[in-house]
Every structure is written in C-alpha cells, then in structure tokens.
Image: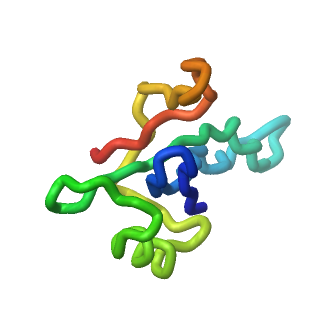
Amino acid sequence: MHCVNKVNNTYCISVVESGAPIKTTLAGKTVIASKPNRVFGLLSVKDSDGNKVTADHPLARDFMSTLNKDDLLPEWKLSSNPVLDTQTGEETGMFWAEPI
C-alpha cells in the first residue's frame, strides 16, 4: 500500500512481514499451521541524489504504477526501529523497513 504523510508531504510504502504457513502433523494428520501475527512497517526512501521523495516525486509515481499489493521485497526487511507517532512520539506498533 502506498501512503503519503500529509504533514510533510513524504511518500512511503507500507510493508507487511508475516511468516509462511507451516505444514506439520497433528495427531498423525497433516495440517497447515496458521500464519504468525503480521507485523506492519514503513519503507521510506530518498532518491539517488539524496532528495526527499515527496508524493509528487517521479519515483513515487513510478512506485505507485509498478508496485502491487503482495509484491515481495526480498532486498528489504523490517528493522527493530519502531515508527513513532509524529505528534505524540509514542510507538505505533510498526517498524521501519531497511535494506538487507
């Protein structure tokens, strides 16, 4: 999902990290265990010149036209750095994505 921070007009991509279902056995029967809880995060980048990618930046427009829901981003992972609410400073339950 694409998002725009209306406070500072920055563009970001929401990221969901979840484990794959696990095939296992239970009482001698093959079952698929439920996926673990999902963890949400944000991916925010600058362009190759170090400029902030705003909502009207060509990169943001390109990402919006090429990235789809459920696309895998194998070069990225969620970090342990929490996303903080810009007004309260409290943790949001999301984490920043970072390159691997």
Q: Look at 66% across and 49% down and name the residue there.
A: 21
Q: Quadrant of the C terminus?
A: top left
Q: Does 25 sit above or below residue 69? A: above
x and y, in percent, of residue 4 in the image: 55, 56
Residue with the most extreme front position: 7
**In the depicted view, which residue is nearer to us: 70 or 63?**
63
Q: Is residue 98 above or below residue 6?
A: above
Find the residue positioned furthest to the left.
Answer: 49
Q: Quadrant of residue 53?
A: bottom left
- The front one of 78 and 51 is 51
Q: Position of residue 81 (x, y in %)?
A: 42, 26
Residue 74, horizontal then vertical, whole percent: 38, 57
Residue displayed at 84% across by 35% down: 27
Q: Work out whether 31 lies above or below 49.
A: above
Q: Quadrant of the N terminus?
A: bottom right
Q: How many marks?
A: 0
